[in-house]
Image: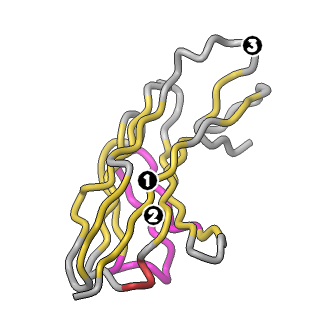
Amino acid sequence: ITCYFCVPTGVSSTYTVLQTPPSIIKKVGQSVSSQIHCSHNVSIFDRILWYKQDEHRALKFLGYLNGEYPYPEDDVKGKISFDGNARKHSNLTISNVSVTDSAVYFCAASTVLQIPLKSIQKPLLMSLQRD
C-alpha cells in the first residue's frame, strides 16, 4: 500500500506534516533552492513524494526521496531536485524557474504498511512574476 501522509485509523491525530512556506514568488530565471520544505513526525515513514498541480489542475508526479536517496522522474531531472532524510524532512529545489513552474506543489509521505490508513496532505502555492 502506498500511503500519502497517512496515519492509522483509530489513532489520535498526533501525527503531523508541515510544508513551508505557504507561497513563494520568484522571477523567471531565478531558482527556488531548498526553499520548499516538507517535514513529518511519522517515524515509520521513509519516503517523501513530490507532486506539482498546474493551472489546469493536472497532478504530476515529480519523484521521491527514499531515505536520503532522491529519485526524480526522468522528465524533471536537472530541473527539479530534492534532498533531506525522508524519515523526517525533504527540501524541493527548482532550477531556472519559468512561467510553467507556477503551480501548487504537494509533498506526501509514504511507507509500506498492511493496516487501514487515512490521508493528510499539505499544499504549497508558488507564483511567478514577470519583469
Q: Which residue is mark 1?
A: 65
Crowd around label 1: few <14 · some 14–19 · many ≥20 (10 Å): many
Q: Secondary structure at mark 2?
A: strand
Location of residue 109 in the rendering, given as x and y in whole percent from the top left corner = 53, 42
Location of residue 12 in the rendering, given as x and y in whole percent from the top left corner = 63, 11
Location of residue 83 in the rendering, given as x and y in whole percent from the top left corner = 30, 54
State how many labels appear: 3
* Quarter in which the N terminus is drawn: top right
Q: Is residue 37 left or right of residue 87?
A: left
Q: Residue furthest right?
A: 116
The amino acid pointed to by label 1 is Leu
Distance between mark 1 and mark 2 Cα atoms: 6 Å
The amino acid pointed to by label 3 is Gly
Q: Which residue is mark 2?
A: 71
Location of residue 51 in the rendering, given as x and y in whole percent from the top left corner = 54, 62
In the image, which disc is placed on residue 10?
3
- Which region of the structure is painted magenta? 61-79
**Label 1 with label 2: CB-CB less than 8 Å:** yes
**Label 1 with label 3: CB-CB less than 8 Å:** no
